[in-house]
Each structure stands twice: as C-alpha cells, then as structure tokens.
Amino acid sequence: MDWARLAQLVEAIGKARLVLDLSCRRRGSDYFVVTDRWQKFTELAISRETLGNLAAWCAEFLIHAVDVEGQCRGIDQGLVSHLEQWSPIPTTYAGGAWSLADLEMVTRLGRGRIDLTIARRSTFLAAAACAMTTPWRSIGGRHDVWTPGGGYMSTR
C-alpha cells in the first residue's frame, strides 16, 4: 500500500470525497488486493484490520470480487459476508451479480449494510452477456434496478 500516495489523495480531494476501489482475489481462505489487470497479488489482505485502517482515509469502499467479475454466475457470498462483518464504513460490492436473486442475497448476507453494483461497466453489453431479464433503467448515466419491494434501486 502506498500510504504516501493515499495521503496525497486525501489532501487533494478530502476524505469525504474519496472512495477506495479495492479489487481482490481469493488465495486460500483469504482475499488479497490485486493489481496490474488483476494479475499481481499484493500482500494486502482484505480483513477487519485492513478495512479499519483504510476507513480512516476514505468515505467508502468499492470492493471488486475479481474471481467472479464479469462471469454472471452469482456473487462471492463469502466475501459479502466478510464485508458485512469487517467494514466500518459504507461499502459497495461488485462482481458476478446479474439478477434480483443476487441483489436479495447481498441484502441478506450484508444485512442491508452492503450495496451492490450490477452490470457496472456497460449495462447494455453486460446485460446481454448475462441474459439479464431484470427490469432496469438508466437515468443521467446512473443505472437503476427494479427492486422486489417496488421502486428502483441505484446501482451507482
């Protein structure tokens, strides 16, 4: 982790405007931050301690589950459960989600504390690739998904 660079970012834009995007992959029973097109494992493990330390520097986390990203086969349930337990600040999970069942699973496992992105890169292409049947709309570049309780939920 380049703590000096992180300090520069906070100085430049402020903690309240900073979202840390942590892409991670599973190695053994742990999740590690990966870099270089998700190919290089770092020594930074996603853990209660890591997220607690990083939370002092940002307003929110965006956690990418690289092992399931783009596969449209469902979320990494273990990672979502860990994020609910470990993250002290708002957290958005990304990876593998393609249906309302995934949204419901994240809501349940995350106990309402973990947000979810669905088809984040290109909603049209990702929805087509996943054969997404969930009603959605795009408003001002923000994508929303219809929720089972009625209304639309932003996928940011």
Image (cartoon, rainbow, N blue to C red):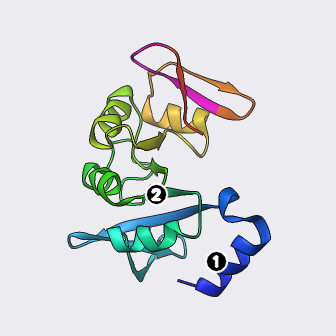
Q: Position of residue 124 (x, y in %)?
A: 60, 32
**Circles 2 and 1: CB distance less than 8 Å?**
no
- State the separation of the CA atoms marked 2 and 1: 19 Å
Q: Position of residue 105 (x, y in %)?
A: 30, 36
Instruction: Tell me which residue sits at (39%, 30%) in the image.
Output: 99
Relative placement, left or right, of 52 versus 145 is left
- Magenta stretch: give its range: 143-150
Instruction: Tell me which residue sits at (30%, 51%) in the image.
Output: 76
Q: Check disc 1 and report its element: helix, strand or loop.
A: helix
* Quadrant in which the C terminus appears: top right
Q: Amino acid at mark 2?
A: His
Question: Where on the picture, by quarter, is residue 104?
Answer: top left
Tell me, yes or no, whether the highlighted magenta stretch contains residue 67. no
Instruction: Tell me which residue sits at (21%, 73%) in the image.
Output: 28
Q: Which mark is residue 64?
A: 2
Q: Which mark is residue 6?
A: 1
Q: Amino acid at mark 1?
A: Leu
> Tag 1 or tag 2, which sits nearer the N-term?
1
Question: Where on the picture, by quarter, is residue 33?
Answer: bottom left
- Above or below, 14 against 89 in this view is below
Question: Where on the picture, by quarter, is residue 102?
Answer: top left
